[in-house]
Image (tube, coloured by chain):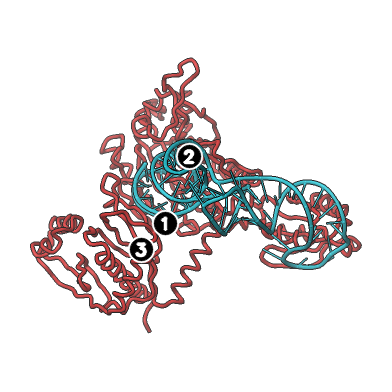
Chain colours: A red, B cyan
Amino acid sequence: MVSSSTNDNNLEVMRHSCAHVLAAAVQKLYPGTKFAIGPTIDNGFYYDFGFKKSLSEHDLVKIEREMAKIIKANLVFTKKQLSHQQAKKIFVNQFYKLELLEELVCDGQKTVTIYQTGNFIDLCLGPHVRSTSQIGPFKLLSLAGAYWRGDENQPMLTRIYGTCFVNQKKLDQHLDQLEKAKKRDHRLIGKNLNLFSFHPQASPGNVFWQPKGYFLMKKLIEYWREKHEKAGYLEVRTPEILTNSIWDISGHLKSFADKMYRVSTPDDKNNWNMSIKPMNCDGGVLIYKNSPKSYRDLPLRMGELGVVHRYEASGELHGIIRSREFTQDDAHIFCTKSQVKSEIKEIIDLCFDFYQKFDLGLDHLELSTRPKNSIGSDEIWQEAETVMENILKENEIDYKINKGDGAFYGPKIDFHLKDSLGRTWQCSTIQLDFAQPENFDLSYTNQAGKKVRPVMIHRVIYGSLERFLGILIESNGGNFPFWLAPTQAIIIPITDQQIKYAQQVKKNIKKINNIRIEIDTSNETASKKIALAEGQKIPYLIIIGAKEAKSKTINIRKRGEGVLGEMRIEEFVKSTQS
RNA sequence: GCCGAUGUAGCUUAAUGGUAAAGCGGUGGUUUUGUAAACCACUGACGGCAGUUCGAUUCUGCCCAUCGGCUCCA
């Protein structure tokens, strides 16, 4: 028996080998191309090339054909150990490979490994399949630009994505899965279920909420308020527009200005003197500073459902998951240093509470450390990062380190969730901040009567309500749980003879429980009304004809389960409460 | 923002160097229907701006928007 991890390894080796075949095909078809790197990724591989002329998607077919030839020719993968000098000679015209070689020298490696397949030689550790015929059915999927070393200041390369499986069936299954995932796209479902829309009359990335989508937002808020009141949070609200003088103190003007919407007043039209808030912190700080604080006030947990605007680069926009206007379920916790641990632990628990409520799985957790454009001293950062890491370790929570990705004022713990295509998005985040209390000269009076600096924790649970809802839609495909569904049940009269009875049924159900019910009074066949209601993913269809009207019953069809049959109103309502 | 692709009614699609075809939807009517789509009529579109051309929805350029990536981020 071969263990599954061995199978995974074999698959990875095969895919990596397929990436080499891709490069070999490119070398043959496009002489003079520069080669960068070609690793495996989840479900496939890619290779980055520096082409002389730009490539178009139509070229992929041509490359695929060439790859098939190479595979058929059954070329052997030959491994060689070379000295740096020997390798440099081989890659003399390969700028990117030479750069990689330099790095290996710096790492102190004496020799390097190369693999040769036909005429194609790559700097590569391997391992590879023995020969190209051992590569299974493959497909090139897409073409994309990618910066060399992931740095936008470096040249842009052309990345070709592909995948490869052990047999045709598995490849077809994978491609089929990708197609199915597209049907769960929140942008498509948002349109079909009439949740939200976009209009050119607004800046791209600004959402118009349709009644049903806004209902979902309100439910998220309702649940949020319930949980946060219990957890001892106070809710505040701060202005949408603040003067640049405050953005200057907090450092936003320096670190965030290229994303801030600029505002001027009518009496000072030509001056950019205010900005729409891209974050809620500054307003929160002013609320804190409004009155002197005592140690007795701490921890002070102040929540704000703040609408923020960030002028994101156009290529970043992604429906409601990445928009330019979004609602943060923000909170700022002002506390003493000794309270930090327990506060952060409580926030982590709250995050997991929410994921459970919405039946969402966390993909992974990251500890993001000091970025380049940070404010605050080395000591402060050192201390903050250590505190954060210790909390994760002490609570035995798995995490990755995301170096240099912290907020400019402090390190963060980020929670990442997956969308339908497996892309991960940062939702919850907890940020520890020693810098802003310094900038704003925040203080409280301690037991000894001395003025002391509080610590500030910034945190969001949903992250952005919009993003969270987008992820939720992609996770459940628009099949919202009963408690959340904008329309929970729809009454479908078989003929218009039953409309009166339908109204009565609705009234009687609402008497027992305030279920959100619609009546479909359209002049359509029952079958069609059922088809439409199913398409709208309504949890319960209440079908009533002459029979039900006579026996004073209703006939229930449940989403995902089909016909449940005739029952009394009380029975139905009771079943929805379980 | 960068690389590549796409852009025809509210939605899904068709055709064309001589101003556009259909289904769904919407409106009006017929029908009174039993668990995924009855019938008839009407309605409604070439993303924008230039250029080439006698003539451009079609070809070219620029812009805008969207999609897949990169980078960035909640």
Query: Is there one chain holding both mark 1 and mark 2?
Result: yes
Horizontal side of residue A238 vs A549, given as left or right: left
Q: Are marks 2 and 3 on the same chain?
A: yes
| A317 relative to A281, above or below | below
Question: What number is the disc on residue A41?
Answer: 3
Residue at 86% of width from left, 53% of height from top? A499
Q: Which mark is residue A364?
A: 1
| Quarter where residue A129 is shown | bottom left
- According to the picture, the residue beneath numbered tag 2 turns out to be A324
Subunit bearing disc 2: A
Q: Nearer the viewer, mark 1 or mark 2?
A: 2
Query: Contact (CB < 8 A) between labels 1 and 2?
Result: no
Q: Is residue A366 left or right of residue A112?
A: right
Number of residues whose C-alpha sits closer than 10 Å to that of mark 3, classed few (under 14), some (14–19) or many (20 or more): some
Q: Quadrant of residue A19 in the image?
A: bottom left
Along the polypeptide, which appears first: circle 1 or circle 2? 2
> For this view, does B2 lie left or right of residue A178?
left
Distance from disc 2 to disc 3, alpha carbons, whole Å, reads: 30 Å
Q: Amino acid at mark 1?
A: His
Q: Secondary structure at mark 2?
A: loop
The quadrant of the picture occupied by the C terminus of chain A is: bottom right
Q: Earlier in the sequence, mark 2 or mark 3?
A: 3
Within 10 angstroms of label 1, few (less than 14), some, or many (20 or more) residues?
Answer: some
Q: Secondary structure at mark 1?
A: strand
Q: Quadrant of the N terminus of chain A?
A: bottom left
Q: Position of residue A391 (x, y in %)?
A: 38, 50
Separation of marks 1 and 2 at Cα, in angstroms: 25 Å
Residue A187: image location, x then y, percent = 55, 51
* Protein chain holding label 3: A
Q: Is residue A506 above or below residue A552?
A: above
